[in-house]
Image: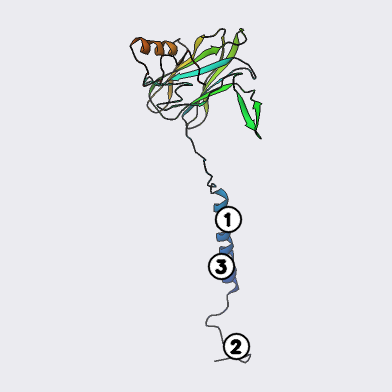
Amino acid sequence: MMDDFGLYPREEPFDPLGVMLFKALQVIAFLFFLALLAVSPDAKDGKIDSKAEFMITLDWPDSHPDDLDLFVQDPAGNIAWYRHREAGFLTLDRDDRGGANDFIIVNGKKIASPIREEIVTVRGILAGEYTVNVSHFVATTGAPVTANVKVQKLNPTAQVIFDNKFTLDHTGDEKTAVRFRIDAEGKVVNVDQRPKSLLETFRSSWRNGADVDPKTGVSRNAVRVRRE
């Protein structure tokens, strides 16, 4: 039945407070949706989310022409180095050749990179001792060079467990920077600098008749002949 104004009566009385609450709920839901869009990661081709337990870095003075190499051995005997960049949980993420072919391409032009740094990451937990060595592959200047090795435990929070400088003074010079031991949960239980030659590990495998060591990926001529 129509009222005096020609309108049908409402089935329920108008509630302005309820309408305001409903509109407020709509606004909150819309803002929540926008927040989800803002925090959602964009899908990008080639993007890789990597996870590492430890990061080991070697660096020496910027623009230095000498070639230093980082070698890391895990408790199982796997060794990551420039000819075997992935070994067990070890990954050589950056190999620096000093003044030889150390450049980046920008707009089709070669630009020399001044940074002298090598990086090995440990991407899983394997209990036991890790050995970190540095080899002076090419002593271009013929003078001693000071290098720095840092070991960081990344999980659950970043923690520096070793950071020290040392000197290499001739081609073929090999130094043990640090040896550290972890338990089954990844906790560092010991750090020391007892010397241990990883290059001698290679030579021992050759003396035993191996052409290629399955753990190190090394052939008989690999240490003497640098990759192209």
Q: What's the CA distance linking mark 2 and mark 1?
A: 40 Å
Label pair 2/3, CB-CB below 8 angstroms: no
Label pair 2/1, CB-CB below 8 angstroms: no
N-terminal of the pair, mark 2 or mark 1, is: 2
Specify the label residue 7 is tagged with. Answer: 2
**Circle 2: element type:** loop
To which quarter of the image does residue 3 belong? bottom right
* Residue nearer the viewer, 40 or 28: 40
Instruction: Name the residue tied to disc 1.
Output: 34
Q: What's the CA distance linking mark 2 and mark 3?
A: 25 Å
Local packing at callout 2 (Cα closer than 10 Å; few below 14, some 14-19, many 20+) is few
- At horizontal 55% and vertical 16% (from top left) the residue drawn is 68
List x then y, in percent, for residue 33: 55, 57
The three-letter code of the residue at mark 3 reads: Phe
* Residue nearer the viewer, 75 or 91: 91
Instruction: Name the residue tied to disc 3.
Output: 22
